[in-house]
Amino acid sequence: MSQGALTIWFTGLPGAGKTTTALALAKAIKEQGGSTPLLLDGDHVRSGLSSDLGFSATDRAEQVRRAGEVALLAAQQGFTSLVSLVSPNADARDAVRRRHLDHGIGFVEIFVATPIEVCTARDPKKLYAQAKAGTLKLMTGAGDPYESPENPDLIIETHLMSTDEIIEQILAALAQR
């Protein structure tokens, strides 16, 4: 992990645990003596790099493309990139994977497969509540589609395991690569 040249992409519904898992993985990488990973969280990317984008399917795909390009640039410089983005469209995620592979950069897609009922109960940003109230249109998982990965490199279920167990699972899968 200290060599970088890798992007780890967390995808899943809002509230699935993508950011929590990415932060815990970053900490584990640092504790193992690796370099500090570049964290690209969807909310942070959207507030700056993608502040001009809305939530249409086209804008969401562009958000994924932009985050993918930043992750690729960082990985090309030897950093591990951890991207936690809903990224609801499979084609957009696949395009990012292809860009990485075309440049000889490793790409690991992790599907954070948390059931919508659990995400709705967690609702850390109150997005599901807003969608239910009708004040949030185009909410992924609550009216706007999320395309689950067909062949992710790893599936994690944050509702069934502790964060420590999840990180152990991810590190073991990365070690096998």
Image: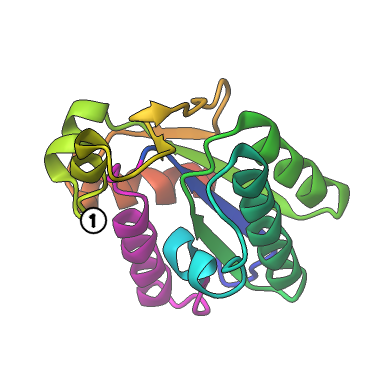
Q: Quadrant of the N terminus?
A: bottom right
Q: Residue furthest front?
A: 134
**Residue 63 vs residue 69, the one in the foreground:** 63
Residue drawn at (42%, 68%) of the image: 29
Q: Which residue is mark 1?
A: 125
Mark 1: few, some, or many residues within 10 Å (few <14, many ≥20)? few
| Relative horizontal placement of residue 26, taking residue 68 as reference (left or right) | left
Percent x, y of residue 81: 58, 64
Residue drawn at (49%, 71%) of the image: 47
Percent x, y of residue 176: 54, 42
Vertical relation: 81 (above or below) 58: below
| Relative horizontal placement of residue 68, taking residue 175 as reference (left or right) | right
Q: Quadrant of the C terminus?
A: top right
Q: Quadrant of residue 97?
A: top right
Task: Report helix, strand or loop for mark 1.
Answer: loop
Q: Which residues are magenta?
A: 14-38
Residue 64 belongs to magenta span: no
Scheme of image coloration: rainbow
Disc 1 residue type? Answer: Lys
